[in-house]
Image (tube, rainbow, N blue to C red):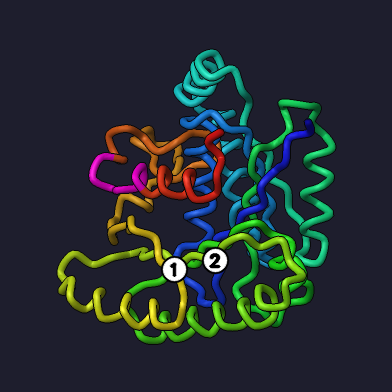
Amino acid sequence: MEKKTLLVAFSTQKGGIGKSTLTVLMASYFHYVKGYNVGVIDCDYPQYSVYKMRERDKEIASKIPYYKEKSFLQFKTIGKRNYPVDRTPAPNAIEGAKKMIDEYIGDNAPDVIFFDLPGTLNSEGILQTLASLDYIFSPISADRMVLQSTLEFAGIINDSIISTGKSQLQGLYLLWNMVDAREKSDLYKVYEDGIGELGLSILKNSLPDTKRYRHEMTEMIAPIFRSTLFPIDKRLIRGSKFDLLADEIEELIHLKQ
C-alpha cells in the first residue's frame, strides 16, 4: 500500500503571529526528533522566510567547524539528511508537493509536508491550495485584531472550503501562540467560549511569549531554538511547552500508526 503524505499548514491572514516560525519548529521537531520524513514548501512570496532561513543555516554550517561536527553527529545518530525546503509560488504549491513526493521512493517519501503560505486569502491560488490540504492550524493571540482577523479567516475556510464538501480538509484548529503569562487566564476562557460558540476547535496546548524563539543559528555558537538544520536545543525546550504541542498535533493528524 502506497504511503499517503499528509499536507499541513500553519496559516492565517494576520502577519506577525508566528506561522513561519511554527512551520520551521514543527518541521524540524518532527524530522529530527520524532523520526518522520518531512518536507517544507515555502509559498510566502515575496519574503520566502523559511527558504531564506535554510540558505542562511547552510552558509553558517559550512563555515563553522562546530556546526559541521554537529551536522555529522546528527546524521550519524538519526541516519537522515536535512529535510528539503522548496520555494514555490502559491498557485503551484500542491504541484510542488507532488514533485517533492515523487523524488523519493517508497518508505523514504515524506510522511508530512508543511506549507508556509502568504498571509492573505486574496493571493492567487491560496483558496485552491488550502482546499487541497489535510489540516490547517491557525495561530492566534489574545489581541482583538488578531482574533477578529483569524476568526474571519476561519469563517471563509468553513464557508468556501469545508461546507462545500469538495475538499480533503480533515481539520481546522486554532492554537494560542505568544501567550503572555501576565494576562489573566479568565480572559482566555472568555475568548475560548466565544470561539467554541462559533463551532471552532482550539488546541489544548499553547506556546508562551518568550525571547528564546529568537535564538537562530549565528556564527556565535549558542543554543539554537529555531533552525531548519537542527531541532530545538534540549536546554531551551524545557518550559517552552513546544514538545507538548508537537505531541498533540502528532496525535490529531494521525501520524502515529
Amino acid type, mark 2: Leu
Amino acid type, mark 1: Ser
Residue 107 appears left or right of 239: right
Q: Position of residue 1 (x, y in %)?
A: 78, 31
| Label 1 sits on residue | 201
Give the magenta range: 238-244
Q: Residues within 10 Å of mark 2 (few under 14, many from 20)?
A: many
**Residue 172 - label:** 2
Q: Position of residue 152 (x, y in %)?
A: 53, 85
Residue 134 falls inside the magenta stretch: no
Q: Based on the displayed image, in which of its 4 quarters is residue 178 positioned?
A: bottom left
Residue that protrudes farthest toward the top in the picture: 76
Relative depth, front residue between 116 and 176: 176
Check if mark 2's residue and mark 1's residue have beta carbons within 8 Å.
yes
Residue 44 appears left or right of 11: right
Earlier-in-chain disc, 2 versus 1: 2
Which quarter of the rendered picture does the C terminus lie within? top right
Q: Position of residue 13 (x, y in %)?
A: 56, 76
Relative depth, front residue between 254 and 65: 254
Marks 2 and 1 sit apart, C-alpha to C-alpha, by: 7 Å
Depicted 222 relative to depicted 203: above or below:
above
* Residue displayed at 26% across by 74% down: 188
Q: Secondary structure at mark 1?
A: strand
* Residue displayed at 65% across by 38% down: 111
* Residue displayed at 67% across by 55% down: 42
Residue 47 appears left or right of 192: right
Relative depth, front residue between 220 and 76: 76
Q: Position of residue 180 (x, y in %)?
A: 23, 67
